[in-house]
Structure formats: structure tokens, C-alpha cells
Image: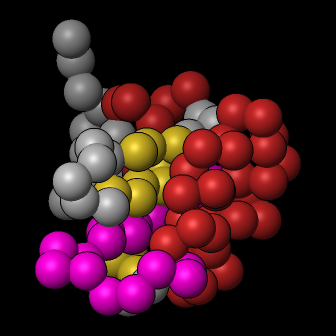
Amino acid sequence: MSVPSMTPERTLRLVRHPGADAFLDDARPELEQDEPLHGLILGVAAGLRSVPAAALPPYFATVRDRAGLALAAVMAPPYPLVLASGRRDAGDARVA
């Protein structure tokens, strides 16, 4: 499997969000364009807005490139990482 080289057109930006509200502000508009596909990650993030602080805080992140949202990620320990992307090329991306 070849991985595309990183070029200015392919530069990715990873943002770790401090909480569910910031994550949803960033990712929701694009994820809601295909809500049946992204309902799980949207529901998990929305549910975590009202959960008190846990021993292991949740993880919220988005990855963007020039085309927009490439990947959204939420993890609420002890549950596994949930990833969402409506883009076919998201599996080819590497965060530098």
C-alpha cells in the first residue's frame, strides 16, 4: 500500500478540543450532512456535554485539510475510539 506524499494541498491540521461543545461547534455542520452515517459520534459527543468530569476525561479531535473536515474522533474511556468521516480519502491521510 502506498501512502500519498504530504504536499501543501495535502497538509492536515489536527485540533484537540477541550470539550464536547467545542468539538460539536467544529464538526457538527459537516457531520450532520449525513446524519444517518454520523449519528453515533454526534450522539456520543452530545451526551458527553452533560456528563460530570470523569477520572479519565473524554478525547475530542478533528482533522482538517483544504477540502474541510477529513476526520472526527471521540473517545470516552473506558469505551473505544469512535471515528467518523464522509470522505473516501480519509484512510490515506497521515497527520504530520
> In the figure, is residue 56 to the left or right of 84?
left
Image position of 36 (left or right of 56) = right
Indicate whether 29 appears above or below 7: below
Image: 1 above or below 4: above
Residue ID at (50%, 31%): 89
- Identify the residue at horizontal 33%, vertical 57% (top origin): 75
The quarter holding residue 17 reads bottom left
Q: Height in image: 96 above or below 80? A: below
Q: Residue at x 70, y 65 (%)?
A: 28
Q: Relative to the observer, which residue lies in front, 29 or 89?
A: 29
Instruction: Please state which of residues 7 and 64 is positioned toward the viewer in this rendering.
Output: 64
Residue 65 seen in this snapshot: no
The answer to whether residue 66 is magenta is yes
Does 29 lie within the magenta span? no
Q: Position of residue 38 (x, y in %)?
A: 66, 42
Q: Nearer the viewer, residue 96 or 79?
A: 79
Locate the C terminus by quadrant.
bottom left
How many discs mark residues in the rendered view?
Answer: 0
Please provide the residue range marked out in magenta: 49-69
Q: Nearer the viewer, residue 16 or 91?
A: 16
Residue 2: x %, y % from top left: 22, 18
Q: Residue furthest top?
A: 1
Where residue 56 sits in the image (x, y, percent)? Answer: 17, 74
Q: Is residue 48 left or right of residue 33?
A: left
Residue 60 in sight in this render: yes
